[in-house]
Amino acid sequence: MALADTLAPGRGVADRMQLLVEHSTDLTAVVEAGIVLTDEAGELHVVATTGKRVTDIEAMQLSTRSGPCCDAFTSGLNVDVDDIEAARDRWPEFADLAGSKGFRAMHSMPLRLRDAVLGTLNLFSEKRGPLSDQDAVLAQAMADVATIGIVQDRTIDKHATLNNQLTTALDSRVRIEQAKGLLAHQHGITVEDAFVLLRSHARRNGLKLNDVALDVVERRVEL
C-alpha cells in the first residue's frame, strides 16, 4: 500500500522519489537511502535522500564518477558492498567518506527499463553484511516502483510537450488564416493571393510567417 501510494496522480518525480527513499528505511533494515537519476544528457543527479550524510556520499560519487552507484548505473547490475572497509582498494574515496559517516554496508540497485538504466536506488546500513532475503525482495520492488514512477512522469512530460506544440501550431494556423482573410478584404484579392503577399513579406524581411500574420491581425504592419 505504501509503495503504491508513490504512484498516486499529482505527484512530481521528486516527490515520488523522496517517498520511496523514506519507505526504504521504513520497510527494510537499512538506515538511510538515496536515489540518483540521469538527465537527457546522460548525467546523474541526486534527486532524493533521507539525510545529509547520504547526500554528501552520493554527491561525492557523482563528482568523482566512482563508487557503487556509478558502477550499478554503468553495468545495469546490482552492486552489493557488504563491507565498505573491505572495498577500500576499489573505491578509496567512497570508503573513506562512507566510513566517516558511520556506514558499514551499501547496496546499489539500477532503475532499469529494458536496456535503459534511468538511475540507481542506493541503500545504506550501519552494520556489515548483505540484505536479508526479505529486504532484498522489498528493495527490488522499490527499485521497480521508482522506475515506473520515472517513466510515468517522463511520459506525462512528453505528452504535455506534444500538446503544447500542437496548441502552438493550431494557434499559428488560425492567426495566418485571419491575416489572409484581412488582406484579401483590404486589397480585394483572393485568399490564395493574400497568402502569397504574406509569405513574400516574411521571406523578404527574414521574418517568421506566424509573426507577420500576428502583426497584420493586430494592425502593426500594412502589406
Image (tube, grey):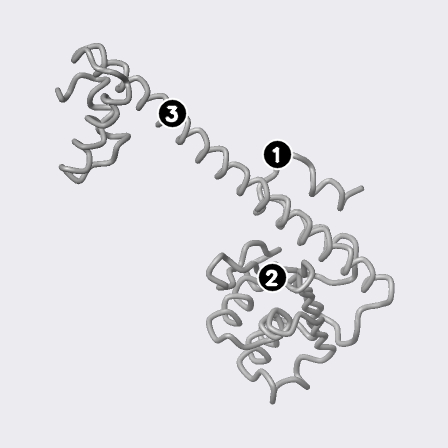
User: Which residue position holds label 2?
Assistant: 119
> Which comes before the other along the chain, label 2 or label 3?
2
Picture residue at 50% right of the left edge, 63% below the top: 42
Which quadrant is home to the C terminus? top left
Q: Image quarter for residue 108?
A: bottom right
Q: Is residue 126 above or below residue 221?
A: below
- Distance, label 1 to label 3, CA atoms, is 28 Å
Q: Amino acid at mark 1?
A: Gly
Which kind of residue does numbered mark 2 sit on?
Gly
Whether residue 164 is situated above or below residue 176 in the rendered picture? below
Residue 10 - label: 1
x and y percentages locating residue 62 in the rendered image: 50, 69
Decide which of 76, 70 is in the foreground and name it: 76
Marked residue nearer the N-terminal end (2 or 1): 1
Element at label 3: helix
Nearer to me, 174 or 164 = 174
Relative to 32, residue 185 above or below: above
The residue under label 3 is 171
Coordinates of residue 220 in the picture (x, y in percent): 15, 20
Q: Secondary structure at mark 1?
A: loop
Please name the amino acid that badge 3 sits on. Answer: Asp
Q: CA distance from mark 2 to mark 3?
A: 38 Å
